[in-house]
Amino acid sequence: MEEFSCKTKIISGPGAVAALGKLGARRAFVVTDTFFMKNGTARRVAELTGCGEVEFFDRVVPDPSVELAAEGTAKLRAFDADLLVALGGGSAMDCAKAMGYFAKGSYTVAAIPTTSGSGSEVTDFAILTHNKVKHPLVDRRLRPDVAILDSDLLMELPRGLIADTGFDVLTHALEAYVAKGAGTVTDLYAREAFSGAYAALPASYAGNKSVRLKVHLAATMAGMAFSQAGLGLCHAMAHSLGGLFHVPHGRLNAILLPSVVACNAHVAGAKYAGLARAAGMGGSADTIAVRNLRNSLVRLRRELNLPETLLQAGVDPRAVWRSAEAIVEATLADPCCGSNPMEAEPFVVRRILEEVTGRV
């Protein structure tokens, strides 16, 4: 028996953020970062809510900490909002979702992603960092009520951010497609998300703004897929490495994903092959299609000027191996490992670390 649900109302297109005014809210609490406060976007969004009273929490930073979320939770409780707005990338949305979850109030939660990657606007996940370890929170109550995908917010994205977040979309879709919890509906979303993002990312990176909404929608579809199918070893390792070395999450996924595909192929080869063919990578035999998938990911990584190793990402391999035990332990404890198509054992994690640090 399969089950699929998505309570999030999705509104997309140019100017979609104006839909905030139809939510009937009176008091809005806006969670964002200093960039969107300084450039006026946060205040423009707040005005569109139509609320008489607005409070801003603009202290979100990459890899938000448990302490930061706790500070925001206290302010949210004190303000007594009926609308909680998350404006920004995955960090802003995760932080806002965690704040709403811990505050235990009655809010309409509206997520407005300004990057195309995390899918947090439709997921049951929120990632917080504590003591250099990323901790995924997983609960259906974390899923936003409204996701607003406004393509006008994507026009000035930096190329590096397009690359990082774009590979996050690909990883979400690919891991969801082979995850233990995958089903007919999640496969449809994951396959469409992977194929769409793979086709559009080079053009978006090159400056073609007309494809940005396509990648944005792919990120949301991938989020809908993995929120119910699960993720896998790539994300578990990216969480453990990201908490220690503060490399952007999507960049870590780009480094890790080809190696993870190779490790999982003996269990998930048939599904990998199907995904490769759906994305136009070809391969008459499954083994050839899986090889094409891995090689295509490597070529795209190069085309997007993303690093191939942790060293190229600025991480000293010696520091990685000094922390190897902690990395392995955090990886295996990560909830994403539980839905990986094969059991993730310590030697598998170490093998991938050897590949991405250049020891092999």
Image (cartoon, rainbow, N blue to C red):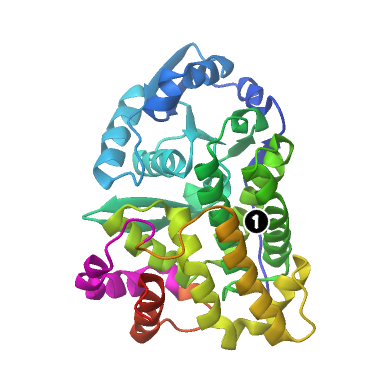
* x then y, percent, for residue 312: 38, 59
Q: Main secondary structure of the magenta part?
A: helix
Q: Is residue 214 left or right of residue 153?
A: right
Quick one: 124 or 354, which is closer to the camera? Answer: 354
Residue pointed to by mark 1: 5
* x then y, percent, for residue 136: 39, 58
Q: Is residue 219 left or right of residue 358?
A: right
**Magenta residue check for 332:** yes
- Would residue 107 be seen by someone viewing this image from the given angle? no
Measuring 56% from the left and 19% from the top, which residue is drawn there? 49
The secondary structure type at the circle numbered 1 is: loop
Measuring 30% from the left and 60% from the top, which residue is drawn there? 315
Q: Is residue 321 above or below residue 238?
A: below
- Would residue 317 be seen by someone viewing this image from the given angle? yes
Quarter of the image holding residue 355?
A: bottom left
**Magenta residue check for 244:** no
Q: Is residue 64 left or right of residue 208?
A: left
Quick one: 81 or 39, which is closer to the camera? Answer: 39
Amino acid type of the residue that numbered disc 1 sits on in the rendered structure? Ser
The stretch in magenta equals 312-337
Q: Is residue 149 above or below residue 192?
A: above
* x then y, percent, for residue 114: 54, 35
Q: Which quarter of the rendered picture does the C terminus lie within? A: bottom left
Q: Is residue 116 left or right of residue 15?
A: left
Quick one: 297 or 193, which is closer to the camera? Answer: 297
* x then y, percent, for residue 217: 68, 46
Q: Is residue 210 above or below residue 293?
A: above
Quarter of the image holding residue 290?
A: bottom right
Q: Residues within 10 Å of mark 1 (few under 14, many from 20)?
A: few
